[in-house]
Image (cartoon, helix red, strand yellow):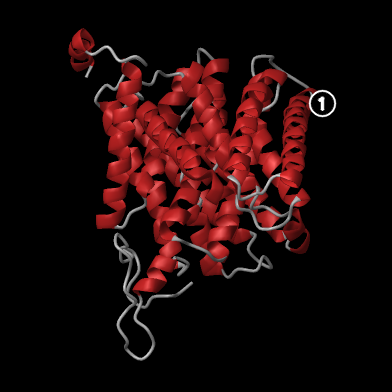
Amino acid sequence: MNEIMAVWAEWIRPSAGLPTVQWSILMAVAAAAGHLLQRHVGLPKVVGYSLVGALAGLGGFTGAVWPLQGTALFLLELGVSVVLFEAGGRISLRWFRHNPMVLLQSVAESTLTALLVYYALRWFDVRPVVAEAVALVAMAASPAVLSRVIMDTRASGPVTERAMVLATLSTLYAFTLVSARTGVINRGEQSMTETLFPVLVVLGVSFVVGAFLALALRMALRVMSPTSENTSMLLISLLTAATALAAHFGGSAPLAALLCGMLLKQLNPRPWTWPRQLGIAASMLMLLMFVLVSVVAAKADWNPAVAGLVGAVVLARAAAKIIGVSAANWGSGTNWKQAIYTGCAMSPMSSVALLLVSQFVATLPEQGPRIASIALPAILLMEVVGAIITTFAIYRAGESSRQRAAEPLPGGSPPTVQAPGAFAPPFAAPGDTRG
């Protein structure tokens, strides 16, 4: 690919630069691949996005440099911020007051994930600093992949909503702990107060930035319609400004966006129209995120020695998610089968994990490459396989409207005629609504 780019550079002189042309073509190919894969195979579009990005990365695509920096890092943070803002807007704090077991499920699965991944890596004699970093990264599920799968399968129900909430909360824990840990990891032995203080700083600064952003949006909603495209443009502009400022003051931009969404939901509890109004802008950011993550992750140092560690991380993480959600399921409002499907739906890793890894790489120049060599292949694997597992879990739980549309009507009537491009569920037997 480097040779092809060298030939092109001799006669192509685009005004925006050759990398712009490369990325535009790559995203166009990814969009087409995602559409075709969903239409003809029945898999979510994110699988097509990731596969195209992975092939480009393995082929030597030069449009993304690791570790991430500059414009690429900012765009990834902005995309994650938009996704987490929407995810935060789904969470009502009043729900936790009536169903506190959901919080217990969240803490249980996140804690168990970190512990199992850490000790699995230590069993392979991985250094404690590296094992700790990978364990913290593994805590976070991917609200971006999960929201994309939910959109493609048109899913709704207890498993879908529970998985989205738990994935969002695990992201909150991971961003807080990683941001705090990277701030003190080079300071040696510390007391409990010195260890907790950075956590409070990250949460405090992110909360302040998120609160100002929520208040600004709340004031805008008093004079602007939530369904107006101008309101959506205002939202993206303010999120962009917050993304640029939050880290500068010692906070986390994605964490601030997540807290902003949660606060705005409490101030404006009516049903949200943001996802629909954000439209193409948010979709383009998500497409860019998935392609960028897979391009960067595919450039990792793939070798047989790392394969065993990646397998251990993936298996330990999957077991922890399922066991953690199931162990705290009693009294949470779902049955045991739904709890297992919820744990499976939390398997994807993507842009959030990549941002966390980039923080460790920037902070630990010596151990950073080792952390990335384990985490990046795991991220790429679980961006693709995790999306497939999530789709399987949603179909088996019977929460996809596409699945219900493909089922025969009572009395042996033929199934409802599907719209062009719709597909029959690949993972569910006809008439299977168990779960």
Q: Position of residue 20 (x, y in %)?
A: 35, 21
Tell whether 326 sits left or right of 370.
Answer: right
| Residue 388 visible | yes
Q: How many marks?
A: 1
In which quadrant will I find the N terminus? top left
Residue at 41% in and 25% down:
373
Q: Is mark 1 on a helix, strand or loop?
A: helix
Front residue of 220/86: it is: 220
Residue at 48% in and 25% down:
371
Q: Position of residue 180 (x, y in %)?
A: 68, 26
Q: In this view, which residue lies farthest toward the right? A: 193
Disc 1: which residue: 193
Please name the amino acid that badge 1 sits on: Thr
Residue 375, above or below 94: above
Front residue of 370/297: it is: 297
Corner quadrant of residue 323:
bottom right
Q: Position of residue 159 (x, y in %)?
A: 54, 62
Front residue of 220/213: it is: 220
Tell whether 351 sits left or right of 91.
Answer: left
Tell whether 102 sits left or right of 374.
Answer: right
Q: In this view, which residue lies farthest toward the bottom? A: 411
Q: In this view, which residue lies farthest toward the top? A: 10
Front residue of 357/111: it is: 357
Mark 1 closeness class: few <14, some 14–19, many ≥20 residues within 10 Å: few
Q: Position of residue 360 (x, y in %)?
A: 55, 22
| Residue 131 visible | no
Tell whether 128 sits left or right of 264.
Answer: left
Residue at 47% in and 28% down:
125
